Image: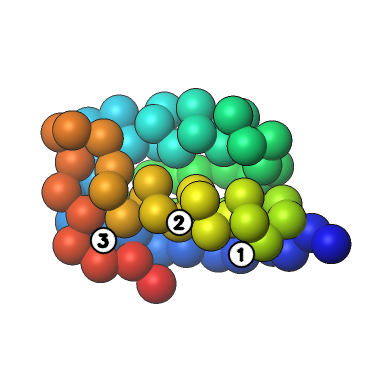
Amino acid sequence: MNKCIKIKVFGRVQGVFFRNFIKTKADELRIKGFARNMPDGNVEIVAQADEESLNKLIAWVKEGPDLAKVEKIY
């Protein structure tokens, strides 16, 4: 059964290919959704898939690409 989650990512996550990184990972896992830059400098992710795929995505979000510095997510 699919679930839908919304994640807000805080830290240095804009201008570091964060959204492209997440899209690549989401495509690999066949996750539907989007990631967008927010005016406050953070990134919002909305994703829909099975729970296992979403958990893998969350793990990648916590790491981010090399240039990013993820401080927290919720």
Q: Which residue is mark 1?
A: 5
Q: Residue at x 49, y 27 (%)?
A: 24
Q: Residue at x 62, y 50 (%)?
A: 53
Query: What SS does tag 3 mark?
Result: strand
Q: Residue at x 50, y 49 (%)?
A: 57
Image quadrant occupied by the N terminus: bottom right
User: Which picture quadrant has residue 42?
Assistant: bottom left
In the rendered structure, find residue 58 and report the number of the disc placed on it: 2
Marks 1/3: CA distance?
A: 16 Å
Residue found at the far front of this picture: 52
**Mark 3: which amino acid?**
Phe
Residue found at the far bottom of this picture: 74
| Residue 19 position (above or below residue 74) | above
Left or right of 63 in this view: 47 = right
Point out residue 23 in the picture as x, y percentages from the top left corner: 51, 32
Residue 13 seen in this snapshot: yes
Marks 3/2: CA distance?
A: 13 Å
Left or right of 1 in this view: 17 = left
**Mark 2: which amino acid?**
Ile
Q: Nearer the viewer, residue 17 or 54?
A: 54
Q: Which residue is mark 3?
A: 10
Point out residue 52 in the picture as x, y percentages from the top left corner: 63, 56
CB atoms of marks 2 and 1 within 8 Å: yes
Query: What SS does tag 1 mark?
Result: strand
| Residue 17 position (above or below residue 3) | above
Left or right of 30 in this view: 71 = left
